[in-house]
Amino acid sequence: MAEKEKVEKLINKEGLIAYLKELISQVEQGYVMVGEKRVDLPESFELEIKYKEKENKKEIEWEIEWKF
C-alpha cells in the first residue's frame, strides 16, 4: 500500500533558511520529517532539482527518490 504525506505552507526567506537548516540536521542523522511522518534515508539516492517558469509563477522543486 502506498503512503503519501504532503506539507505546504507560506513562509518568508528567514523561515525557509530555518527549515533548510533543520532539514540538513535531519539528513545528517539519516532521516527526514514530512509533516508527522519520519522517513529514514538510505546511504545513496537520486536527487532531482527542477526550475519552472510559466505566466506569473516561478517554481523550484526538490525530489529525492530511491528504490527499496
Image (cartoon, rainbow, N blue to C red):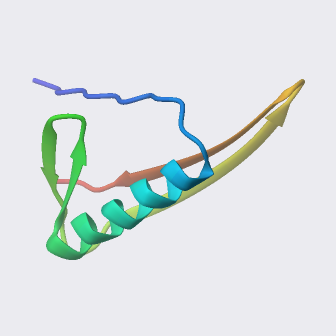
61, 21: nearer the viewer: 21
| Quadrant hosting residue 45 | bottom left
Report the number of discs.
0
Image location (x, y in percent) of residue 52: 75, 41
Image location (x, y in percent) of residue 8: 44, 28
Image location (x, y in percent) of residue 6: 34, 28
For residue 7, side relative to residue 13 (left or right) = left
Image location (x, y in percent) of residue 27: 26, 68
Q: Quadrant of the N terminus?
A: top left
15, 32: nearer the viewer: 15
Q: In the rendered view, would you say 23 is above or below 62? A: below
Residue appearing at x 27%, y 70% in the figure: 25
Residue appearing at x 33%, y 61% in the figure: 23
Q: From this viewpoint, which residue is outermost toward the right?
A: 55
Q: In the rendered view, would you say 35 is above or below 13? A: above
25, 27: nearer the viewer: 25
Residue appearing at x 23%, y 76% in the figure: 28
For residue 13, side relative to residue 34 (left or right) = right
Q: Quadrant of the C terminus?
A: bottom left
For residue 25, side relative to residue 56 (left or right) = left
Q: In the rendered view, would you say 37 is above or below 40? A: above
